[in-house]
Image: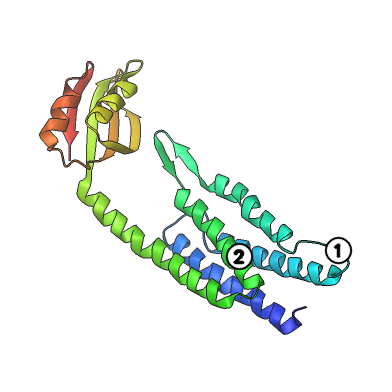
Amino acid sequence: MVSEWELFLRLALSCVLGGIIGYERQSRRKSAGLRTNVLVCLGSCLIMVLSEALYFNVEGRTNADPARLAAQVVSGIGFLGAGAIMKEGLTVTGLTTAASLWVVSGVGLAVGAGYYSGALFTTALIFATLGTFSRIDEWVMHEKNLLITIRTKDKPGQLMNISSCIDDLQLKIRDVKVKANDDSTDTLIIEMEVYNQRALKNVIVLDAVRRIDGVVSVDVN
């Protein structure tokens, strides 16, 4: 059994490590920020400590598995992850936030088990991954992203026709926004952010989209 001071240390450390990861998420205005990550890490730590305490209480009298209760954290955290993942049109967001919630529960379990070095090193790796890799990803994507603004007739299936054209050009759609055109009631303005992995020239994309029936104008930046 762990002493009260050891218990307080584990719970406090889990709050600190969860807070480090949560701070990074909140600084980027993600749905699961400081408080969410602290609570996930703290709860995981407490459940791990409880698992060990229950095992020591029945040790020698049953074949209880001390990891069974803690294992439910790994699968049970999925409900928070599912709530963080959002789908809007063709865009899916929140996958990284959901993954960080899952891994921060692992940090809490490690602290609860007294595996401090693993918890500290994992926290450092998580913080580096979320921070450094995000900046690299933003830099690379910014260099190869295109913003396509399309004015088109409002007719059934037009968005699918445009999306199919973009797919044929082997461009990856990252975001889509559709809004009404204030100058005309029968036209729409579609803004698409696409990843131009093949580094196609703007004129090629512009010419391909302009050929779609119903498209009034196209602007590629």
**Label 1 with label 2: CB-CB less than 8 Å:** no
Location of the C terminus by quadrant is top left
The x and y percentages for residue 11 are: 66, 74
Mark 2 or mark 1, which is nearer the start of the sequence? 2
Res 5 → quadrant: bottom right
**Residue drawn at (71%, 78%), measured in percent from left and top?**
7
Residue drawn at x 23%, y 35% as measured from the top left: 148
Q: Residue at left 71%, top 64%? A: 47
Rendered location of residue 67, percent (x, y): 70, 62
The percent coordinates of residue 144 (x first, y second) are 21, 47
Q: Is the residue 103 above or below the residue 98 in the image?
A: below
Asked which quadrant contains residue 10, the reply is bottom right
Nearest the camera: 175 or 190? 175
Image position of 99 (left or right of 133): right
From the image, tell me which residue sits under label 1: 62
Q: Assign a secondary structure to mark 2.
A: helix
Q: Decide: few, some or many residues near mark 1? Use Cα within 10 Å; few <14, some 14-19, many ≥20.
A: few
Farthest residue in the right direction?
A: 61
Q: Amino acid at mark 1?
A: Thr
Please tell me the numbered disc located at residue 107: none
The structure's colour scheme is rainbow
Q: Note whether residue 35 is visible.
A: no
- Give the Cα separation between the discs numbered 1 and 2: 29 Å
Residue assigned mark 2: 41
Query: Would you say 145 lies left or right of 69 here?
Result: left
